[in-house]
C-alpha cells in the first residue's frame, strides 16, 4: 500500500487527488495544498518507491513495474478510503498515470488537470531515454537524473524546480530508479494511444511557455480533443506548479469548480 495523506473539508464532498512525477514525492505539492484544501477534500500520495512509499518487505513492489500496476496502486488507495470519484491533478509522468487511470477506470475520474504533461516524446526526448536505458545500470542514477533534469529544465528560472526534484530523487535507490526507467519501454505505444483517443473527461493542460520538450505536442492534442483545453503559463518551464504556483492554483481550482 502506498503512503498517503488526507485533508478533509468540513463541507465539500469533492475530492482532488494529486499525483507527482518520477523522482518526486507528494511534498512537491506543498504550494498547492493550502489553497486547494479551502475548497476540496485532498488526497496526497507517494508513488511506489518514492517519498515514504518504501517497500515494507524486501522487493515488495518487485512483482510488476508497469503503468497499469502503478495505476492500480493509486486505485487501491482510493478504494480503501471509499472515494467514489475524484478530480486528479498531476505533474510530468504523473499525468501519464492519471490518463491511464481515466482510460481504465473512467467512472472514478471527474476531471484532470495535467501540469507539464507528457503526451509525446520528441526526438531529443527519445535520445535521452535511449541513453538512460544504455547507461542506467552503469552510471550512478543521480548523475543521470541531474542530466535529465537539466535538459528538461535548462533555464536559470528553472533552477528551483531542478533542485527540488533532484533532492527528492536522492531518496530513491539505484535499483528503484532502474525499475522505473524500464517503464520507458512501454511509454511510446501508450502515448500514441492517448493522442489518438479523445477521452470524454474534462481535461485542462497547464503548461509552461518554456516547456519546449512537451508543449508543442500538447497544443496538437488540445486542437484534436474536444474535451481538452490548454492554459500556457508565462515565464515557466516544465514544473509549473512550483515555478508559478499562484497561476497554477488559480486556473486549476477554477477549472475543477466548473467541471
Image: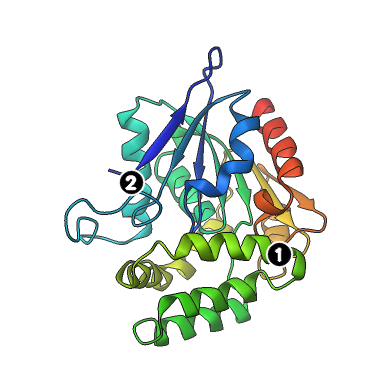
Quadrant position of residue 3 = top left
Residue 72, label in figure: 2
* Quadrant placement of the N terminus: top left
Whole-percent x, y for residue 214 in the image: 66, 65
Question: Front-most of 127 and 177?
Answer: 177
Quadrant position of residue 139 = bottom left
For label 1, the SS is: helix
Whole-percent x, y for residue 42 in the image: 51, 30
Whole-percent x, y for residue 145 in the image: 50, 73
In the displayed image of the protein, which residue is found farthest to the top? 11
110 with respect to 2 (left or right): right
Quadrant position of residue 195 = bottom right
Mark 1 surroundings within 10 Å by alpha-carbon count, few (fewer than 14), some (14 through 19), many (20 or more): many
Residue 23 appears in the picture as rendered: no
In the displayed structure, would residue 36 be above or below residue 236?
Answer: above
Residue annotated with mark 1: 158
In the displayed image of the protein, which residue is found farthest to the left? 57
| Label 1 vs 2, first from the N-terminus | 2
Please report contact status of discs 1 and 2: CB closer than 8 Å, yes or no: no
Residue 250, label in figure: none
In the displayed structure, would residue 189 be above or below residue 127?
Answer: above
Q: Distance between the residues labelled 1 and 2?
A: 32 Å
Amino acid at each position: 500500500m502506498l503512503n498517503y495523506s488526507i485533508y478533509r473539508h468540513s463541507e465539500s464532498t469533492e475530492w482532488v487527488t494529486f499525483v507527482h512525477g518520477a523522482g518526486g514525492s507528494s511534498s512537491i505539492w506543498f504550494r498547492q495544498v493550502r489553497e486547494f484544501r479551502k475548497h476540496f477534500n485532498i488526497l496526497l500520495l507517494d508513488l511506489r518507491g518514492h517519498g515514504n512509499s518504501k517497500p515494507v518487505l524486501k522487493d515488495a513492489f518487485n512483482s510488476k513495474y508497469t503503468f497499469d500496476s502503478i495505476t492500480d496502486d493509486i486505485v487501491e488507495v482510493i478504494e480503501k478510503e471509499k472515494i467514489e470519484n475524484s478530480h486528479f491533478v498531476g505533474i510530468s509522468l504523473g499525468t501519464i498515470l492519471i490518463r491511464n487511470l481515466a482510460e481504465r477506470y473512467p467512472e472514478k475520474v471527474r476531471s484532470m488537470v495535467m501540469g507539464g504533461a507528457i503526451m509525446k516524446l520528441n526526438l531529443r526526448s527519445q535520445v535521452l531515454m535511449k541513453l538512460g536505458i544504455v547507461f542506467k545500470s552503469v552510471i550512478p542514477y543521480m548523475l543521470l537524473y541531474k542530466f535529465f533534469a537539466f535538459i528538461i529544465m535548462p533555464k536559470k528560472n528553472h533552477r528551483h524546480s531542478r533542485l527540488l526534484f533532484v533532492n527528492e530523487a536522492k531518496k530513491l535507490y539505484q535499483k528503484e530508479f532502474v525499475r522505473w526507467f524500464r517503464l520507458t519501454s512501454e511509454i511510446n505505444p501508450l502515448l500514441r494511444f492517448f493522442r489518438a483517443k479523445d477521452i470524454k473527461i474534462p481535461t485542462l493542460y497547464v503548461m509552461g511557455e518554456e516547456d519546449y520538450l512537451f508543449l508543442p505536442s500538447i497544443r496538437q492534442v488540445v486542437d484534436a480533443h474536444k474535451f481538452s483545453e490548454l492554459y500556457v503559463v508565462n515565464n515557466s518551464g516544465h514544473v509549473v506548479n512550483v515555478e508559478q504556483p499562484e497561476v497554477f492554483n488559480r486556473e486549476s481550482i477554477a477549472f475543477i469548480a466548473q467541471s
